[in-house]
Amino acid sequence: KLEEFETSTGLSMRIFGFMSILLTDQQAFRDFAITRRELGKPVIGLFGKVWGDKIDRNPSSLIAGYKTDLLGINSQDCLLCVGGFDRYPSYLSLAAAVMAYKANNDVDHNLTNDPLIVNNELEFQWNEDGLGEATDMVRSGAIIAHSSKRGKYIVRGVNTYQNNSNTWDAANKKTCSSQQRDLADFVSKTLKDGIEADIIGKDGVTRLTVETYMIQTLNKLVGKYLDPNDPVVPPFKINSIVINSNRNGWDIDWDARLVGETDFVKLTTNIIV
């Protein structure tokens, strides 16, 4: 049905707000997302939990329970929102807020520190100063809400991918950052759609034709989507353009340096005396 809708409308479905809180259902969507990515049509699944599904407020068992769920999903295409607000479960509150931010902003938007309109209470008051609970949850791949003197806000825009010691897992070409995944998919889709429209099926296409198209298209993405500010690494690099084995098309290999996200700032103040 989804393919029929996309074919008939010309639209590509990207974000799915998933209503089921069952881990098995969320894992089924994860598998669907894997299939879609293999087809070159990646999707995002936004998951949540019910209010009070973790009754025991003991920090170690509470966080351990959610870590089990996060490990069970473990996908760069799936976001799990933990902890609701105003007595609404997270799949109807925090996940809905994340959906709104993603739908109303460009793909380079960073969810970190986005404010939340909370009238009453957060489901969880994470003990960050004493136990580091918020940090532990984020490092485990959860999107959570937290409060400070600035108000209520999203802590970080992460997905459930568990190999998250670095923003990008270079070996597996996966990321724990929701923003970086969106950016990479957007840049790839921009090129793919343009090549299908302007290169495939055209007469007299040469390697130079393809290279020129790539450079002109990518130059338009530099600044907002591709990072021009690194003194060593260029925003993009075309490694090779070769005729494929069937001699009926081209194989293109290229590198992209995406714009980053500012999630941390280290301030060192030196007093000169």
Image (tube, helix red, strand yellow):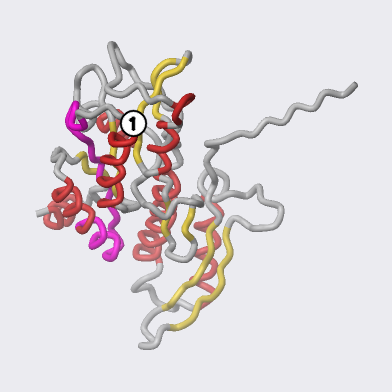
Q: Residue furthest left?
A: 1
Residue 267 location in percent, x, y? 68, 30
The residue under label 1 is which amino acid type?
Pro
Residue at x 49%, y 51% (from the top left corner):
165
The x and y percentages for residue 192 are: 38, 62
Report if residue 106 is visible in the image: no
Q: Is residue 50 magenta?
A: yes
* Classed neighbour count for the residue bearing mark 1: other residues with Cα under 10 Å, few (<14), some (14–19), many (≥20): few
Q: Is residue 245 above or below residue 128?
A: below
Using the image as rendered, state which of residue 231 and residue 204 is in the foreground: 231
Tell me: residue 254, above or below residue 216: below
Q: Residue at x 49, y 62 (%)?
A: 170
Q: What x and y, as percent, mark residue 17?
A: 21, 39
For residue 155, what is the image quadrant?
A: top left
Q: Nearer the viewer, residue 233 or 59?
A: 59
Q: Nearer the viewer, residue 165 or 5?
A: 165
Q: Is residue 150 left or right of residue 57?
A: right
Q: Report which residue position mark 1 lands on.
A: 59
Residue 151 visible, this orientation: yes
At a point 25% along the width and 30% down the height, the residue shown is 96
Identify the magenta region: 32-54
Look at the picture and state if 193 lies above or below 273: below
Residue 20, percent from left and from top: 13, 40
**The magenta stretch spans residue 192:** no
As helix, strand or loop, the secondary structure at mark 1 comes to helix
The residue lying furthest to the bottom in this view is: 246
Instruction: Count the marks.
Output: 1
